[in-house]
Image: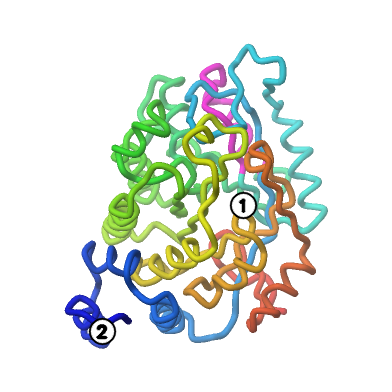
Amino acid sequence: MSSGPLAQALRVQSDAGERIGPDEGLYLLRGADLLELAARAESVRYGLHPDPAVSFVIDTNPNYTNVCTTACRFCAFARRPAAADAYVLSVQEVMAHIETAVQLGATTVLLQGGHNPALPLRYYLDLVRETCTRFPGVTPHFFSATEVRQMAQAAGCDVREVLRQLWAAGQRTLPGGGAEVLSDRVRRRVSPNKGTVGEWLEVHRAAHEIGFRTTATMMYGHLETDEDIIEHLDRIRALQDETSGFTAFTAWSFKPGATPLSRRVSATAGACRYLRITALARVYLDNFAHIQASWFSEGKQVGQAALHFGADDFGGTLLEENVHRSAGYTNTSTLDEVLALIRGAGFRPVQRTTLYETVRSY
């Protein structure tokens, strides 16, 4: 790393295997040599996963509704309830999307939608029950923390009761969407109607205590500062210390596209920024087993590079995705291409489940 007292202290810390704090995290984000940071992240990665394998999941990400009353400034997907192109899929229509993905080998379905106050809790429970009944080989990786809060508001109960009913219906995992950047200052500016940092964390805390495993995410590159990014990492690391319920962390950059926020943010963050954040996350989140490479949002070559910046997982094949597409950003792949990309980066591909159980080693 670069010379100086903090860089020297970080070398000592690294050699001793000690946890870094916010000051050191800021230094790694702002001033550390990128390739030296990559080497440190790789060291952490191989300490956790000595085998030069990279996992991936065959998955799909359909949407059950685009109706949303939250009006986040970074979103081009949502529609007001009265919009001409607003929709709500029936349970059977969602099952048809899942069936198509299952025929292509999907084992995970990441189902999300808008915050639609017209949908009752029984609709969500029926989606879970029907998926588990009709597709027992599929993990219903459904509903972000903010959607769970919407269900609770519509049902007039607390989030723990909603989570208990989802568990009884057969759900076992939740995605980490809706986090954006876990700084209330940032959330007030980009998603003021979406709830506080504490509310997002409380849904995941309650889910972990019930038995769910969840992921953590971060969407950066809009109105956050470096300090906000460190706050985000620090908050999810603290919750992981408390519950051990997160399976993986994924970061991706904001895509301005046709979003309201595009008037203030006109370009996406670059590859070097993404790789630095990925490597920082691997070093900072020392209690997370997995870091995902976000090839879908950052591009396939950048996704490959991330595998040398601390990531050990290549995410999913994403047979269907509509949110980024609405912002004018489309990146697709196939199983054969995912295998080739992982091999091309020098690793052995391993297909996994949502919970990182091995399905097949290639």
Q: How many marks?
A: 2
In the image, which disc is placed on residue 139?
A: 1
Q: Which mark is residue 242?
A: none
- The percent position of residue 230, horizontal first and vertical second, equals 30, 57
Which residue is tagged 2? 11
Secondary structure at badge 1 equals strand
Q: Residue at x 47, y 35 (%)?
A: 264
Outermost residue toward the top?
82
Q: How is the image coloured?
A: rainbow
Marks 1 and 2 in Cβ contact (< 8 Å):
no
At 49% from the left edge and 44% from the top edge, which residue is drawn? Answer: 177
Q: Amino acid at mark 1?
A: Thr
Q: Looking at the image, is 265 positioned above or below residue 102?
A: above
Vertically, is 107 above or below 338?
A: above
Tag 2: amino acid = Arg
Q: Secondary structure at mark 2?
A: helix
Residue sitting at x 64%, y 84%: 346
